[in-house]
Amino acid sequence: MESLITVLLKPGEGDRIVAGHPWIYHGEILRLTAPVVDGALVQVKDHRQRLLGVGFFNSRSKINVRMLAPERVEVTAGFFEERIRAALAVRQRHLPTATSFRVVNAESDFLSGLIIDKYEDVIVVQISALGMDQRKTMIVAALQKIFSPRIILERSDVASRKFEGLAESSGVLSGELSGPIAVNLNGLKFETDLIGGHKTGMYLDQQVNYQAVSLYAKGGQVLDCFSFLGGFGLHAARAGAAHVHLLDQSDEAIEAAKRNAAVNGLADQCSFNTVNVFDWLKQHTAVKPHERFDLIILDPPSFTRNRASVPDALRGYKEIHLRALKLLKPGGTLASFCCSHHVNAELFLDSLLSAAYDTRHILRRVATYAQSPDHPVIPMIPETEYLKGFAFEKVR
């Protein structure tokens, strides 16, 4: 095993690393035993010279070291194969029938800066850290061996790469991709643009919640706000909703949702509207009688990019909750989600309950939601927990 340069931490800074958090910031480092090339593997010790593990070093990032293991390891294609197989086993255990899911969720799977998504027989890789980027060939070799995929695609077009000194990078790494692919979620097909779609193509973190929320749809009038490709709305239609109305501001998303409804034989139960959801809700609550729905689903994109924007985000969440509650029938269900790490569950819940108070409604909580199990939460890494949701029944 190669000799590694040592990163020594200041007194007291090793506790968080021992507990499992993988990030070491510049201000936590006491000294280096020698100059280090950015992207190199280093060993980390506390101020008493006790080994804490190994990780990738990058002086250009605020996160100077991203830990990989609590012991010395050799980072080879075999290392990545072992880690990816271990992550895959978690998904196979918790989502045994899924054919599309997140295989590796960065810090959640102890591979900081690496996301791997499986869309049927296509693998999409997203890399946001220098050490991982330098070992892309090893990662691809491991993926070829494990999955033998038809295509491996890179979608490293995330702004966070600039903080690692990296330019955005996208393209086909192996195979040939021509046009959208059909992704199967819970037995429904969704047309997905893996080149230009959101994230690595679509949102996989709601896969379990799509099915769970649809339990409240049977026989009812359903409103799916921020519908994107129709995940919640089409699951509700399949579950027996009398009618589902889908809203999204993206014309491309609405057109794709229409095609998805048709492919799944659900078009007759659905209607669609390309519109700013805030404007639509405001318009439809401005006049009486209000339209009434048995199930309203709110799954907006993140309203926050940083902690400074949290107050504005909370006002946005309260606004859509106020409007939705006015459109909800007594006995109806509101399912609402927040995907921002910066807005915790308590703050999000308060925005909903404050809206209920202002509209003089009493709510009964019937379900609590989290991200699907292919996006695991490691409690000692708070950044791994971001998606939260609640379902409330309007008592009166």
Image (cartoon, rainbow, N blue to C red):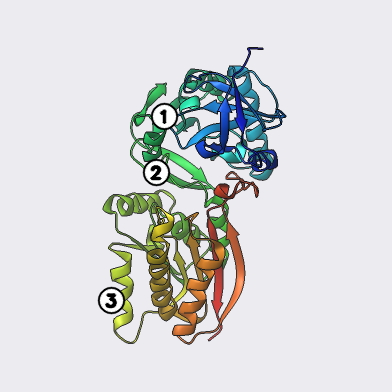
Mark 2 nearby-residue class (10 Å; few <14, some 14–19, many ≥20): some
Q: Is residue 114 visible?
A: no
Q: Is residue 106 above or below residue 131?
A: below
Label 3 crowd bin: few (<14), some (14–19), many (20+), radius 10 Å: few
Badge 2 amino acid: Glu
Residue with the mark numbered 1: 154
Pinpoint residue 221: horizontal percent, then vertical percent.
Answer: 44, 72
Above or below: residue 232 compared with residue 67: below
Question: x and y percent of residue 177 in the render?
Answer: 37, 27
Q: Position of residue 298 (x, y in %)?
A: 44, 65
Q: Position of residue 316 (x, y in %)?
A: 38, 68
Q: Secondary structure at mark 2?
A: strand
Instruction: Report the quarter where the N terminus lies.
Output: top right
Question: Do the residues under discs 2 and 3 have CB atoms within 8 angstroms?
Answer: no
Give the number of the disc on residue 283.
3
The residue identified by callout 2 is 191
